[in-house]
Image (cartoon, rainbow, N blue to C red):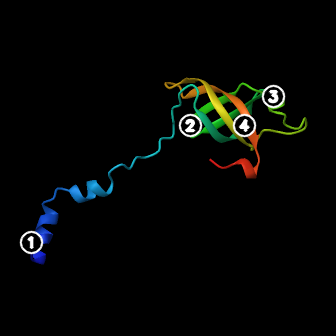
Amino acid sequence: MSDRSSQRDARTDGGGAFRKLLAGWTFRTSTPSYDVGDQLVAYVTGVDGDTPVVRIGDTVLRLATTADDVELDPDGELLDRKVRIRVDSFDAASHRGTAELLAVLDRSEASF
């Protein structure tokens, strides 16, 4: 096959080679959805009143379990801490939900 015919074949492929290259690729969304029971590792990014909040993109999960329930030091703060959580409820329309705090992770436990 000559170089010209292979170039012509590539042009008339209709982007098939490019489509094959990108097959299976997906883009992350800024509002991920979760199912009840999903377990995640994330950072506590804020507090709403006395309730710690985890934000993943524009999705907000309020933590229903307190730090006392997972034996965090009494003076320990959850803000900016890496935590393991389980989704208790989730509204896909508003991208809001609640989650149970399962554990506060230190750097050695932070593996996925």
Distance from Cα at disc 3 to Cα at disc 1: 70 Å
Residue at x-position 27% and y-position 58%: 18
Residue at image mark 2: 58
Q: Of callouts 1 and 2, which one flags the residue occurring earlier in the amino acid sequence?
A: 1
Q: Of callouts 3 and 1, which one flags the residue occurring earlier in the amino acid sequence?
A: 1
Distance from Cα at disc 1 to Cα at disc 4: 60 Å
Residue type at mark 3 is: Asp
Bin the neighbour count of mark 1 within 10 Å (Cα to Cα): few under 14, some 14-19, many 20 and up.
few
Distance from Cα at disc 1 to Cα at disc 2: 50 Å
Residue at image mark 1: 5
Q: In front: mark 3 or mark 4? A: 3
Q: Secondary structure at mark 2?
A: loop
Residue at image mark 3: 69
Number of numbered discs on residues = 4
Q: Closest to the observer: 55 or 110?
A: 110
Q: Are marks 1 and 4 in contact (CB under 8 Å)?
A: no
